[in-house]
Image (tube, rainbow, N blue to C red):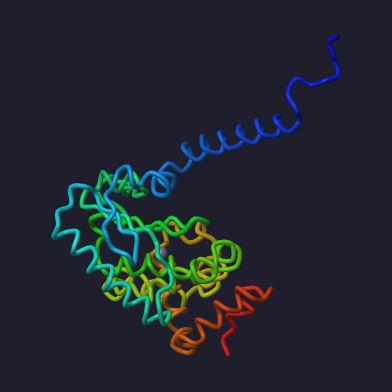
Amino acid sequence: MLNFFKTPISIKKWIGIAFLLLIFWLVILACFYAPTLLRSVFLKDFYLDKLEYKQANIYVNPEMNKEERKDIIFLYQQSRLRIDSLFGSTESKPSILVGNRGETMQLFGHSTDEKNTQLQTGMTHLTPFGAYIVLSPSGTNIDVLSHELCHAELMKRVGWQIRRKKIPIWFDEGLAMLVDKRFEYWADLQKDWVKLSELENNNSDSLSSKFSLQNLQTTEQFFTENAQIHYFLAQKEVAYWYNKKQKKGLLELINNLRTTKNSFSENYKLD
Ligand SMILES: [Zn+2]
């Protein structure tokens, strides 16, 4: 006799099917919205060669010759010294994707400017699985790599979740600018700032509210058409703070962010 009350597929199986469907849709969504992130995390071995080097996971495009590959390792070692001096040591072991072909690096996250001429120099995908640094040919230098390594190091030390929840973007970028010496040569930016400071004398309210660190908490707020001014402000603030607090203060801040429920501003306080 047929038992109509017995479901042909058990509840457990239904849950399994629903779970697989969910994963399937998440993968489809990720392919659609974040293809460069997905390639950097899961498909880099397919497109790039991994160098035999233990201290970092370095990937290069296959066209790179032996000399260029050696230079990349040397570049990493030099950049790492800057991280060592800022934090006291280097704990992170990010994946570093480097290429001498702009087209290849675009697959992993680089976009061109509006005129479609210049590639972004460097960027880092910060994920729960780790940091994935992507350098374009024009960003393969000690300043850009040190900058990106600093983002990876801060995330490694506080954790992905705490970085995301507690650390304002101005601090993350300001800290990275301490190991990124390009800033000293940003003459145009200096000129812009002088102009803005002059404006400030005339109209202090609007300028200080427009360029306050309070308004630079998220990436959306930071990376606008005024991004260079934001970098400048962030660097100024964090350089001042680090000068006072030094390495010890930075490590204390990181420890407090990890172990207390206090907000960033409570832990950062300048005294
Ligand atoms: Zn940055």
So how many labels did they put on this image?
A: 0
- Residue that protrudes farthest toward the top in the picture: 1
Q: Is residue 190 visible?
A: no
Quarter of the figure with residue 7? top right
Measuring from the top left, give residue 129's x and y in whole percent.
Answer: 49, 55
* Image position of 181 (left or right of 36): left
- Which residue is rendered at x = 41% and y = 82% of the image? 88
Measuring from the top left, give residue 187's x and y in whole percent.
Answer: 27, 72
Q: Is residue 259 visible?
A: yes
* Image position of 101 (left or right of 92): left
Q: Relative to the observer, which residue lies in front, 235 or 215?
A: 235
- Which residue is rendered at x = 23% and y = 58% of the image? 138
- Which residue is rendered at x = 26% and y = 57% of the image? 51
Quarter of the figure with residue 166? bottom right
* Image position of 150 (left or right of 69): right
Measuring from the top left, give residue 189's x and y in whole percent.
Answer: 33, 69
Quarter of the figure with residue 235? bottom left
- Which residue is rendered at x = 37% and y = 49% of the image? 109
Q: Work out which quarter of the rendered image holds the N terminus and state it.
A: top right
* Image position of 143 (left or right of 246): left
Query: Eyeballing the image, is 209 above or below 127?
Result: below
Query: Eyeballing the image, is 15 above or below 192?
Result: above
Measuring from the top left, give residue 70's x and y in whole percent.
Answer: 18, 63
Q: Relative to the observer, which residue lies in front, 269 or 100?
A: 100
